[in-house]
């Protein structure tokens, strides 16, 4: 069965810069072993959020949309966890391809962020932070996003996500 929702937060993000800032704030509350799943259509801002997260974690290398690779590891420049950034778009639902990535091996010591992972990576952990990004309805600037964060599992049960909306 799915774990009950623990914590959730909805916020409006008004620009790519603000999305980066959200990522930098999120980095402050993440720790090794955390799995973050990003859901949203193409251009929603998943990679933009992940870039801010990488900045907040202080990792090496720019976070980009990986064109040829499915997973990219950004080692920490300090003593923090590495960021494993996965774009599962071209990944089939098959277990074989998933297993080749060895995410189960890297997860305990890393922050793992997965774009397009719905239906593919849930088995990795019952503790997950789901982030859903929507373009705001009626926004003609295409700069406004509605972001919903939802923590699942014991890891997130006592967490306070309100620090993200400061
Ligand atoms: P995804 O990874 O979800 O496909 P990207 O982060 O690669 O999306 O691209 C998002 C695009 O939308 C970028 O060109 C970014 O500049 C633009 N954008 C406009 N407003 C926002 C916003 N509020 N948050 C994130 N990206 C935004
Ligand atoms: Mg992307």
Image (tube, rainbow, N blue to C red):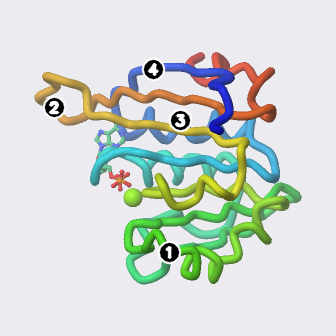
Foreground mark, 1 or 4, reads: 1
- Where residue 93 appears, as percent x and y from the top left, is 46, 69
Report the front residue among 71 and 103.
Answer: 103
Tell which circle, 2 or 4, labels the residue nearer the N-terminal end: 4
- Residue shown at 63% from the left, 37% from the top: 2
| Secondary structure of residue under mark 3 | helix
Per the image, the residue denoted by label 3 is 21
- Where residue 15 appears, as percent x and y from the top left, is 34, 33
65 up-or-down from 128: above or below: below
- Residue shown at 70% from the left, 76% from the top: 102
Per the image, the residue denoted by label 2 is 141
Tell which circle, 2 or 3, labels the residue nearer the N-terminal end: 3
- Where residue 125 appears, as percent x and y from the top left, is 72, 51
- Residue shown at 68% from the left, 23% from the top: 6
Q: Are marks 3 and 1 in contact (CB under 8 Å)?
A: no
Report the front residue among 105 and 136.
Answer: 105
Using residue 71 as the reference point, say whether residue 82 is left or right of it.
right
Whole-angstrom CA distance, mark 1 to mark 4, is 34 Å
Q: Are marks 2 and 4 in contact (CB under 8 Å)?
A: no
Q: How many marks?
A: 4
Mark 2 CB within 8 Å of ligand 1: yes
Using residue 84 as the reference point, say whether residue 138 is left or right of it.
left
Per the image, the residue denoted by label 4 is 11
Whole-angstrom CA distance, mark 3 to mark 1, is 35 Å
Circle 4 residues within 10 Å: few <14, some 14–19, many ≥20: some
Foreground mark, 3 or 1, reads: 1
């Amino acid at each position: 069965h799915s774990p009950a929702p623990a914590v959730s937060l909805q916020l409006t993000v008004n620009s790519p810069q603000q999305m980066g800032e959200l990522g930098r704030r999120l980095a402050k509350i993440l720790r090794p072993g955390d799995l973050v799943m990003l859901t949203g259509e193409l251009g929603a801002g998943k990679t933009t959020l992940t870039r801010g997260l990488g900045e907040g974690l202080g990792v090496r290398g720019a976070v980009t949309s990986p064109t040829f690779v499915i997973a990219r590891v950004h080692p920490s420049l300090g003593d923090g966890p590495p960021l494993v950034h996965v774009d599962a778009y071209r990944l089939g639902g098959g277990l074989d391809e998933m297993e080749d990535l060895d995410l189960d091996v890297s997860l305990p010591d890393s922050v793992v962020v997965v774009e397009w992972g719905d239906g593919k990576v849930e088995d990795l952990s019952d503790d997950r932070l789901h982030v859903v990004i929507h373009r705001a309805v009626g926004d003609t600037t295409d700069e406004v996003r509605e972001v919903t964060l939802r923590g699942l599992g014991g890891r997130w049960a006592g967490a306070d996500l309100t620090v993200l909306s400061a």
